[in-house]
Amino acid sequence: MKRYLIPAALFVVLIGFLAVGLKRDPRDVPSPLVGKPAPAFTLPQLDTEKPFSTGDLRGQVWLLNVWASWCVSCRDEHPVLVKFSRSGATPAVPIVGLNYKDQIGDAKAWLTRFGNPYVLSAVDLDGRVGIDYGVYGVPETYVIDKRGIIRMKHTGPITERSLAERIVPLLAELNKEGG
């Protein structure tokens, strides 16, 4: 009888791990960068080719949204971002696009067709900045505080629900606390 106790106990532990794992969101990939300084970069802007640097937004809370015209999920997310950027919602924060491994002409046409929620889009043609940020796939969005610290990473398309329940409250808190 005792010889069955150890396998039974291991089975119960295994079932427990499985139950916890099934309750997790598979799109929620934790980032080791949360709580750390956002990787600095300087890239040309999509519309002007003028350089943009992360230091340009120091002192502001902002969103970095990684997107591409070839990204199917970005098409689902895009209307939510456009609506948010045009809503005059509080807190108002700049949304910076990081156009990831895309053709410049395709990216410009995509924004013309679907609307442009970004204050600017930086062009990451070779994906090196994406690698620095640990991008698994597009879209991904980072909330960056006034000190340049990544406070949240959202993997996958932003929805009305994720915006209302997670992102907007965090933005309000960060704008209020000064960090």
Image: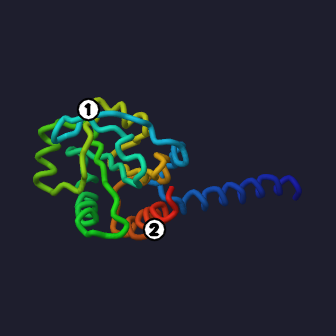
Q: What is the basis of the colouring in this image?
A: rainbow
Query: Looking at the rendered structure, which numbered label has been put on residue 36?
Result: none
Q: Label 2 belongs to which residue?
A: 169
Residue type at mark 1 is Leu
Mark 2 vs mark 1, CA separation in Å: 33 Å
Identify the residue at horizontal 26%, vertical 62% (top origin): 85
- Tell which of 171 and 162 is nearer to you: 171
User: To which quarter of the image does residue 166 belong?
Assistant: bottom left
Residue 125 higher or lower than 153, as above or below? above
Eye-nearest disc, 2 or 1: 2
Q: Label 1 belongs to which residue?
A: 125
Residue 14 higher or lower than 173, as above or below? above
Residue 170 image offset from top left, x and y in percent: 47, 63
Question: For the residue labelled by badge 1, is the local secondary structure a helix, a strand or a loop?
Answer: loop
Q: Is residue 120 toward the left or the right of residue 3 in the image? A: left
Residue type at mark 2 is Pro
Identify the residue at horizontal 75%, vertical 53% (top origin): 10
Question: For the residue labelled by badge 2, is the local secondary structure a helix, a strand or a loop?
Answer: helix
- Tell which of 29 and 86 is nearer to you: 86
Residue 45 image offset from top left, x and y in percent: 22, 39
Q: Do tag 2 and tag 1 residues touch (Cβ < 8 Å)? A: no
Identify the residue at horizontal 48%, vertical 60% (top origin): 174
Identify the residue at horizontal 81%, vertical 53% (top origin): 6
Q: Quadrant of the N terminus?
A: bottom right
How many dots with numbers? 2
User: Few, some or many C-alpha atoms within 10 Å of disc 1 (few <14, some 14-19, many ≥20)?
Assistant: some
N-term mark: 2 or 1: 1
Residue 135 image offset from top left, x and y in percent: 40, 41
Q: Is residue 146 toward the left or the right of residue 89 in the image? A: right
User: Few, some or many C-alpha atoms within 10 Å of disc 2 (few <14, some 14-19, many ≥20)?
Assistant: some
Residue 6 higher or lower than 43, as above or below? below
Residue 129 image offset from top left, x and y in percent: 37, 34
